[in-house]
Image: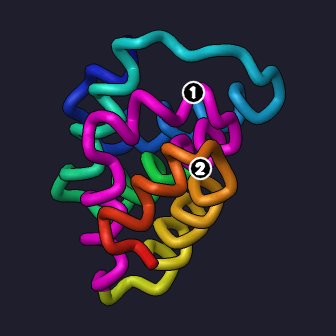
Amino acid sequence: HLLLSDDENVLISSCLTLGNLYCSSEQAIDEGLYARLLELLDHSSKKVQDGTLYAISWVGRDKTLIQPLISNGVLSSLMAFMSSPDLNIQFSASRIIYDISGGSKEQIWSVVSQGCV
């Protein structure tokens, strides 16, 4: 429910918490969270975007869980972050792309076909 908030600080904390929870438990996340994470990548706050990238980075390490994000266009968002003036955002986006490129043949093809490499 916290990820549905409009408050920037709540969103940042929620994304960081989601990443930490996933990191420590490796449990599947609810399907509804995928759409919200994709929405938050377009948030006007760079801090919210950074927190969202952190959460996605942990999801991205599980090749099954990252697929719904790939299917819904996360790679185009990640590529947009590669031209960000914020080097931390660029690094986070490139790390997620790197993790995805170590996945299935279809995931690797998605990385290539989206022009990520």
Q: Position of residue 14 (x, y in %)?
A: 48, 31
Name the residue located 40 percent from the left edge and 53 percent from the top edge. Answer: 110
Report the side of 105 relative to 53 (left or right).
Answer: right
Which label sits on residue 80?
A: none
Quick one: SS at disc 2?
helix
Q: Residues within 10 Å of mark 2 (few under 14, many from 20)?
A: many
Q: CA distance from mark 1 to mark 2?
A: 11 Å
Q: Is residue 69 magenta?
A: yes
Q: Amino acid at mark 1?
A: Leu
Name the image quarter holding residue 99. bottom right
Name the image quarter holding residue 6. top left
Quick one: SS at disc 1?
loop
Q: Nearer the viewer, residue 79 or 117?
A: 117
Q: Position of residue 84 (x, y in %)?
A: 30, 82
Q: Nearer the viewer, residue 45 or 102?
A: 102
Q: Amino acid at mark 2?
A: Ser
Q: Position of residue 116 (x, y in %)?
A: 40, 73
Q: Nearer the viewer, residue 72 or 49?
A: 72
Q: Nearer the viewer, mark 1 or mark 2?
A: 1
Asked if 17 appears above or below 80 in the picture, the reply is above
**Quarter of the image where the C terminus is located:** bottom left
Name the residue located 29 percent from the left edge and 28 percent from the top edge. Answer: 36
Q: Which region of the structure is painted magenta?
A: 55-84
The residue to which callout 2 is attached is 57
Asked if 56 appears above or below 82 in the picture, the reply is above
Total labels drawn: 2
Q: Is residue 16 magenta?
A: no
Q: Residues within 10 Å of mark 1 (few under 14, many from 20)?
A: some
Name the residue located 47 percent from the left edge and 50 percent from the top edge. Answer: 51
Q: Earlier in the sequence, mark 1 or mark 2?
A: 2
Report the side of 88 relative to 79 (left or right).
Answer: right
Which label sits on residue 65?
A: 1
